[in-house]
Image (cartoon, rainbow, N blue to C red):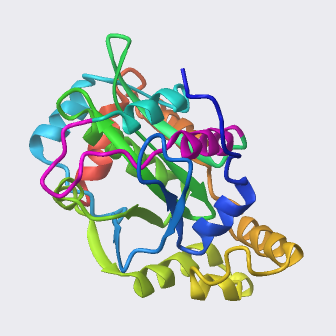
């Protein structure tokens, strides 16, 4: 059960405009009603053709140790990501996912912009991740693991589905040792913004015009007219035409597995796809 709402949720239009501008919200604690907008000096991304899949992880995928789903338990995934946990050396162990942020992303999920990958073992949720998708971009927000390899399996399924759906940029926000071990790379925010603009611009020359506010992330949130902001969001949505949303991309991937005679063990297909380029 969530705490009673004491502050309004972040408006979904503002959230999506922030993501399209390379910015995202955080809080200082679970019960903190305030939010602040983050534009990291250094940004982590995971190249979709550069995921590191170890031999043991490939074995876990092929054996089908877990059941993997999409959008079955979005709120439960957020609860698990926000729960107190033992920190790695490069993490503080606290939660930046406040109740207000969680309610805002649950609303974004209801609207079809935020998605989760769930990893189950014998009916128990043991791993997963969630993030925000738009155009040819997916911004991973957080992941959790309660069983060995469970969050890594979630990430493998995510990468395979994003590739199948035509996404070109997987944003990881901040670098951690865990992400680095999976193949994430770090770059200046300016370089990330260039990739973000390219991913939003689509594939045709006619679409390769990016709203001005995207090139100066942080300065335009809430500063333009409502009509201009709406036009920018609409332009971004148009550029993403033809890209599969994460649930549809995962369904297409499962269809591929079925066509290959691997309907009962889709993890084998995912392992094959990822180890060909890893």
* Picture residue at 37% right of the left edge, 31% below the top: 266
View extreme (right): residue: 227
Compared to 212, does 247 lie above or below? above
The residue stretch that appears in magenta: 85-110
> Quick one: quadrant of the C terminus?
bottom left
View extreme (top): residue: 122
> Quick one: quadrant of the N terminus?
top right
Q: Is residue 112 visible?
A: yes
245 or 267: nearer the eye? 245
Left of 233 or right of it: where is 54? left
Compared to 27, does 216 lie above or below? below
How many numbered callouts?
A: 0
Query: Which quadrant of the figure has residue 257?
Result: top left
* Picture residue at 52% right of the left edge, 63% below the top: 36
Query: Which quadrant of the figure has residue 59?
Result: top left
* Picture residue at 79% right of the left edge, 81% below the top: 224
Left of 21 or right of it: where is 80? left
Q: Is residue 209 visible?
A: no
Magenta stretch holds residue 10: no
18 or 73: nearer the eye? 18
Residue 16 picture location, percent across and down: 66, 61
Left of 53 or right of it: where is 235? right
Query: Which quadrant of the figure has residue 56?
Result: top left
* Picture residue at 27% right of the left edge, 57% below the top: 51
Compared to 86, does 226 lie above or below? below
Residue 35 picture location, percent across and down: 54, 57
Left of 261 or right of it: where is 104? right
Residue 136 picture location, percent across and down: 57, 64
Magenta stretch holds residue 108: yes
């Amino acid at each position: 059960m969530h705490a009673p709402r004491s502050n309004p949720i972040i408006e979904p239009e503002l959230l999506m405009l922030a993501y399209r501008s390379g910015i995202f919200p955080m809080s200082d604690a679970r019960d903190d009603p305030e939010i602040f907008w983050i534009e990291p000096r250094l940004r982590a991304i995971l190249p979709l053709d550069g995921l590191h899949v170890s031999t043991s992880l490939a074995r876990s995928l092929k054996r089908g140790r877990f059941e993997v789903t999409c959008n079955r338990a979005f709120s439960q995934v957020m609860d698990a990501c926000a729960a107190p946990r033992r920190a790695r050396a490069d993490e503080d162990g606290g939660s930046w996912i406040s109740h207000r942020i969680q309610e805002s992303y649950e609303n974004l999920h209801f609207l079809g912009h935020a998605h989760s990958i769930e990893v189950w073992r014998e009916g128990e949720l043991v791993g997963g991740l969630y993030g925000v998708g738009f155009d040819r971009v997916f911004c991973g927000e957080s992941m959790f693991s309660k069983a060995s390899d469970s969050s890594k399996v979630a990430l493998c399924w995510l990468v395979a589905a994003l590739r199948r759906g035509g996404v070109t940029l997987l944003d990881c926000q901040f670098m951690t040792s865990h992400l680095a071990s999976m193949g994430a790379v770090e770059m200046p925010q300016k370089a990330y913004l260039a990739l973000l603009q390219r991913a939003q611009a689509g594939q045709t020359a006619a679409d390769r015009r990016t709203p001005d506010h995207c090139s100066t992330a942080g300065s335009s949130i809430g500063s333009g007219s409502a009509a201009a902001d709406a036009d920018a969001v609409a332009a971004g949505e148009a550029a993403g035409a033809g890209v599969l949303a994460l649930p549809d991309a995962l369904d297409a991937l499962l269809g591929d597995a079925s066509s290959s005679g691997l309907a009962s063990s889709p993890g084998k297909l995912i392992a094959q796809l990822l180890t060909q380029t890893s």
